[in-house]
Image: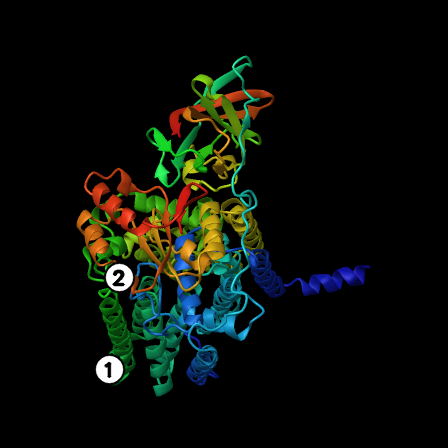
Amino acid sequence: MNSIAEPSAKKSRSKVGLLVLGLLAVLLATAYLSIRKHGAFGQVSSVRPRMNPPTLDSPAANPEPLVVGKQQQAFHGVNSCVIASINGMNYDKTVALGSGTVIGLGGWLLDKMSQTVPNRAWVVLAGQGAAGSYQVPITLHEKKPDVSQHFGGVDGYTNSGFIVDIASAALPAGTYHVYIIFDHGGVYYTCDNGRQLKLG
Amino acid sequence: MNERIARLRVWFTVVNVEWLLFGLAIVFNLVQLALSWNHPILGEHAFRQTQTAISAFWIAKGGSWLAYPTPVLGAPWSIPFEFPLYQWLAAGAAVLLPWITLDQAGRLVSELFFLACLWPAWRIATNYRDGPSMFRLCSVVVLLSPFYVFWSRSFMMESAVLFFSIWFVAALDDFLRRPNAYGFAEMTLIGSLAACIKITTFVGFAYAGALIVCGLLLTSGWRSWHPKRMLPFLLTAVAVALSMVALLLWLHFGDDLKRLNWYGENLVSSAADMRKWNFGTLAQRKSWEIWHVALLRAPNEALGSWIVFLLMAFYALARLAWLQKVVFLALIFLYLSVFFTFTNVHFVHNYYQYANSIFLLASIGYVLHAGMGKDRFLALALLGVVCLVEFAGFYRYFYHDMVEPNRQEQTLLATFVRDNVPDDKMLVIFGLAWSPEVPYYAERRALMIPTGVSESDLERLSRQLDTATGGVPIGAVIMCPNGFQSQPGSSQAYRGLVSKLVTGKTAHTVGYCIVST
């Protein structure tokens, strides 16, 4: 350790310290009195900016008839996504929702081939029988550090989460198979966790 | 031309280079603060940031200053953990500077405390030989640390308690060199404040104080052992004891308030879960994971790469004099000792290393300083490398989190509540633990019911709903995916409680959650 310095001109340091503490107390007293002046539950002006999430400012997306990844197109299944949540529940079983209910889905999706998240992806509701099949675009914005960590800490996977609200009023009642399709270099890939949805 | 080069050469002394880097490092911190200025506090560890912020918000709205509100677990709304000096200042700044938002006020206060740490650090450094140079080098390493740059611009009390903790060490060091009543008062008051604000941070500095006491006793020889000369050391022990008394009184006060809350028994300082949460287990202390955290994760975030630490340690052990090695190892000891005191929190939450990474960084600064006296150019080159790796580390570990959006579900829910729920009504929330992001940005009080609450607690809550809400009308019930739905023991009680809460309300899908208003 360096040797102890001569304590010259350091006599008043503690006094300065107490002075700083006193100034802090005065500052706090001013803040206290100022808050009390407003009265309980008074105005704190512009506490924070209004927050409109960039991709979620519309109430719900309308599904369109399925165009991407149709049966006749070449596409390959991969296992790189989870549709984890639906309308306040964990999506780990067949879920039944009333007709017209907005379908809220949350989950994550990776493109393991490019070690990133897809730029173009859709949730597909493939109806059984005459119900028809529908698609809704999803945007991957939500941070999922746990997912990224699970897949080897790949930085490109960080924003792999999605949230989408789907208006179901136009969808016929029936059972739907819910899965994801994404585009990688013009080829469509399917990610299917076997989710089922009963509507109506 | 030659004259100009000659002038430049004269100017580029080591001292001026150190001051230049010091200034640039401060500017770098302010730039990162500016880049974060308009962002919500929903980045890394948003739970902790909004927990601090929601208290500041309700203090600014006229809530109690000592029994300060953290209205996320129902009435009576107050569950104090830390002494709320930082929250007071953030609330005060938001009120006194009405053109900034509370988020900005919190960030500003935190950053100012971080920069203010330089003052007590200067006090400590200048008690030693070549102190100014040591101060400049250590400061540059700390100021450019990715970890400190990032967390200092967050809405956290960490920099405030770091400031008071370093101040405590400065006051102790000064007091032992020139004992006087002012010094004793300063040391006692600052120690008490630091301990009450956050003991997990203060503890490392209490150890540092103990090392200084040992160092002074050893270096001043047998004369120190004379009873008269022992008095300052005894008074230092009294100051630390008084700080601990202040902490115990604060904990007692906080625990009494917590017990009034339905969930409070789980949060009192003596609760088994809380002890385990703070101190961790013996198995954790014996595991390799703790070394992974201490020697890889934390150095990566603090320095940009653990390799820098390894290189500097090799340099220190190979090139420094034995006394300098002792100082280096003492700083590493302080860094490690905190991991082994509050083990679990350091495992789980990286921001806890705000308390002790400063010792690691100071050890690097100290090695650079010691190196300047031996291999000036090598030390300058190493300083350059350290700074560059720190810049790269900031970009790698923190930059993206700082500038990109996060937690859209919570943002969406908060916006929905602000638009659709009157501000005199409260929220009941399932599936978001008791993280205050939604109640804070919704500006509403909440009763958040974390997954893991037992069936009997859910039934009790259902019976005593009026007590848990404090009579405040429920404006919205938010249901996000949660473990109650599939938990065999509690799914029945959960369904009963939810049914009671949502009767007569209309359900809306918001993101993947359901909000009943």
Q: Residue at x 50, y 72 (%)?
A: A43
Residue A80 in view, yes or no: yes
User: Mark 2 falls on what kind of element?
Assistant: helix
Residue B183 versus residue B112 in the image, above or below: below
Image position, residue B80 (x, y; %): 31, 66
User: Badge 2 is on which residue?
Assistant: B466
Q: Chain of mark 2?
A: B
Residue B451 vs residue A108: left or right? Answer: left
Which type of secondary structure does the marked residue at label 1 adopt?
Answer: loop
Residue type, numbered disc 2: Asp
Residue A12: % across, % down: 45, 85
Label 1 is found on which chain of the structure? B
Indicate which label's residue lies in the foreground, 1 or 2: 2
The amino acid type found where label 1 is placed reads His
* Residue assigned mark 1: B226
Which numbered tag is attached to residue A80?
A: none
Quadrant into which the N terminus of chain B falls: bottom right
Instruction: Report the residue that reaches farthest toward the left.
Output: B456
Q: Position of residue B410 (x, y in %)?
A: 44, 49
Tell me if A100 is positioned left or right of A188 in this view.
left
Q: CA distance from mark 1 to mark 2?
A: 65 Å
Q: Residue at x 20, y 51 (%)?
A: B459
* Percent position of residue A149, x then y: 42, 37
Outermost residue on the right side: it is B1
Image height of B487 relative to B206, above or below: above
Which comes before the other along the chain, label 1 or label 2?
Answer: 1
Assess disc 1: are there few (<14), some (14-19) or many (≥20) residues with their C-alpha within 10 Å of its C-alpha: few
Residue at (79%, 63%) from the top-left corner?
B3
> B43 or B442: which is nearer to us?
B442
Residue extending farthest bottom: B181
The answer to whether residue B129 of the structure is visible from this angle is: no
